[in-house]
Amino acid sequence: MCSLFEILTALNIKYKIEDKKGLKDYNPSAHDGWKMGLEPTTLGTTNRCSNQLSYNHHVSIGIVNNVVTFQSFGAANICNSAVKIIIELIFFIFMNQIIRDSSEMITKAEIVQEFEMRVFEESYPRVYKCLSLVNQDQLWDSPNSNVPAIGCLVLHLCGNARQWILSGIGDDKDNRIREDEFIIHRNIRKSDFIFLLENLKVQLKNCLQNMPEDVLLQRRTIQGYDVTGFSAIIHVIEHFSYHTGQITTLTKMYVDKDTGYYSKRGSQ
């Protein structure tokens, strides 16, 4: 059976061992494996199996800067902590792989592409479909005072995206008054909403495409929340999706028709 340290060596994961003599670095590519425990074989103190440590050491694992650190302390049987060590090691390997894959895969262009697909190619057509099905009165009707009208939800979507993207990530002044988005404006027509959404689309695309790469990790305060640029983008995606679902539900209630979102793409 391979020792814990031989597994680390095989995976080329750097590790350190800390005992009474201090912290020692081990390079997996240069290390030739472990013949016995951490200490030289001494009768009555060290097991024969190469995957066990001295009886008078208890071992824990710490992870700092992607380096596994083993610390020995106290007098305890290694068997009592074996399960904990294995679980922590598996977790470290799993998270290390996720971080490595993420850093290699996610780019600004891919994030912007995902935003445009989810918002402009998914949510936008669904909102337009609903606007085409309801009449002017239904646009501003509501089942009760706690459910916003479709027209209010469209205004809310626009206000949120402007605040979080155009002002939060871009340089536009934040002059949003959220409460006004839920006021009934029966003079606003469906065609006005289409113009508003298309104008917003142009501004959002321009802002995100000209956004410096480092903005994704920079922290900023938006609507009272401390977030990164990446988090702001994800927020607008899920916010659009959430309220598009509400608009869809209200539309189906009013017209009793299938929206046909998946008629051309198959069921999802």
Image (cartoon, rainbow, N blue to C red):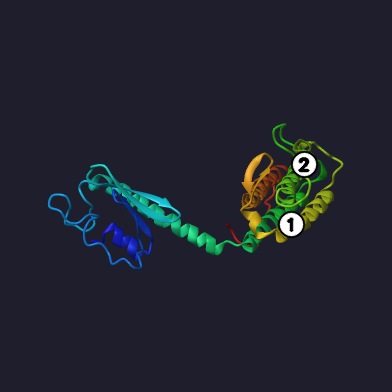
Front residue of 7/161: it is: 7
* Residue 5 in view in this figure: yes
Label count reads 2
Disc on res. 176 = 2
Give the quadrant of residue 15: bottom left
Q: Quadrant of the C terminus?
A: bottom right
* Residue 261 in view in this figure: no
Q: Residue at x 25, y 44 (%)?
A: 80
Give the x, y percent position of residue 192.
84, 49
Give the x, y percent position of residue 251.
71, 45
Q: Which residue is mark 1?
A: 207
Q: Residue at x 41, y 51 (%)?
A: 63
What kind of element bears circle 2?
loop
Give the quadrant of residue 207: bottom right
Against 21, residue 106 (above or below) is: below
Front residue of 240/177: it is: 177
Residue type beneath disc 2: Arg
Give the x, y percent position of residue 134.
77, 47
Q: Are the residues at dot 2 and dot 1 in contact (C-beta closer than 8 Å)?
A: no
**Between marks 2 and 1, how big is the CA–CA gap?**
18 Å
Front residue of 64/104: it is: 64
